[in-house]
Amino acid sequence: MSTNEQSIVVLGAGSWGTALAIQLMRHGGPVTLWGHESVHLADITSQGSNERYLPGITLPETLNIEPDLEVALMGAQDILVAVPSHAFRSVLTAIQPSITSTSRLIWATKGLEAGSGKLLHEVATEVLGDKIPMAVLSGPTFAREVAVGLPTAVTVASQHTDFAEDMARRFHSETFRAYTSNDVIGVEVGGAVKNVLAIATGIADGLGFGANTRAALITRGLTEMMRLGEALGNKQGEQQGGQKETFMGLAGLGDLVLTCTDNQSRNRRFGLALGKGDNMEEALAQIDQVVEGVQTAREVFELSQREAVDMPITEQVYEVLYEGRSPKEAVHELLARVQKAELS
């Protein structure tokens, strides 16, 4: 283990936060894992594994498990937030008193803020100001595969190039590669919208529509993602925000394909259940973990309406989840759309 690494604290002891803590431990340096449930953390400590979210995977013995947030943050220059999007603001508010001039924040949370539809970097800036470096980590990742060390690649995006490069190096190992980007908007939009599209492809597969339909939804869904990202980038006026190239990369197409095609995806499994006839409550009960795309579908749809961005697949997912439209009706609505040029 390196003795020169700065301490990093991972906030969020679910499957993703735990997997990222394991990955950081592979590189070396002190890592602390915090979660909001002290009983859960006590179980992790006693069992040496996170049996609730990553059963059967042994944690590094030197990983520090700390239930006290203030203690966890002591001496940590870098703070990695890996909580669901609905808890993002409250966690940042809780850590705000511990932020110093040397603090650096990175999050691996995907989604938009519930109620406001804000991108997470907007939330972070509102709560913590704009004086500390911030970054977002995203890409095609399933927590269990990261935890067991299967080959994985991600994107770390930040307007602070040095911070992005430092975090990419910190995560790097023989099986984990991190690329850097300055397109925070594009990376965040990709990480949010792909969950909605995974529900759509799950619904289609649950209805038995086959591989052709799945490929069409992924491809046209990518178009929707790009439209929204470009619109938000142009609106916010950030240099190189919402780039098309970002959506063709790991945080866009890569994450989209992963989430839409593999049943490790909670959003895809949720859509499958809907397509097979379960209602929303039944589908959520089967998965028994947060399905980010459920809330994100509302936020992305409402955001697309405010920004006048055409997102028909997202709209139909929203209609199924919140307006009582049946999955079959949603698919028929998409097929009945006026014929148009593919690139229009």
Image (cartoon, grey):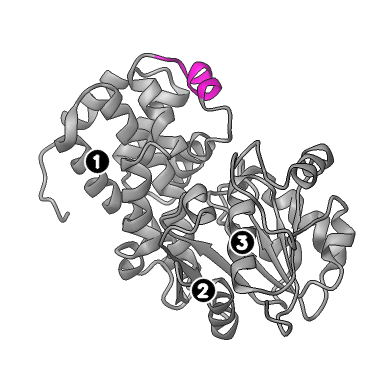
Q: Quadrant of residue 255?
A: bottom left
| First to last magenta residue range | 278-286
Which residue sits at x=41%, y=76%?
240
Q: Marks 2 and 3: in contact by CB < 8 Å?
A: no
Residue picked out by circle 2:
172
Residue located at (33% from left, 21% from top): 275
First of labels 1, 2 by sequence position: 2
- From the viewer's perspective, is residue 20 above or below residue 269? below
* Disc 1 from disc 2: Cα separation: 33 Å
Q: Secondary structure at mark 2?
A: loop
Q: CA distance from mark 3 to mark 2?
A: 27 Å
Left or right for 117, reference 318: right
Q: In the image, residue 14 lies at what x, y percent? A: 64, 45
> Label 1 is placed on what type of residue?
Leu
Residue 341 drawn at (x, y percent): 10, 50
- Comes first in the chain, label 3 or label 2: 3
Query: Label 2 is placed on what type of residue?
Result: His
Closer-to-camera residue (325/162): 162
Count of numbered circles in the view: 3
Task: Say whether residue 215 is left or right of residue 238.
Answer: left
Q: Counting other residues with Cα less than 10 Å from the Cα at mark 3, is it few (<14), some (14-19), or many (20 or more)?
A: some
Marks 3 and 1 sit apart, C-alpha to C-alpha, by 29 Å
* Number of residues whose C-alpha sits closer than 10 Å to that of mark 2, classed few (under 14), some (14–19) or many (20 or more): some
Residue 280 covered by magenta stretch: yes
Give the labeled residue for mark 3: 122
In front: mark 3 or mark 1?
A: 1
Residue 188's disc number: none
- The residue indicated by pointer 1 is 217
Q: In the image, what residue type sits under mark 3?
A: Glu
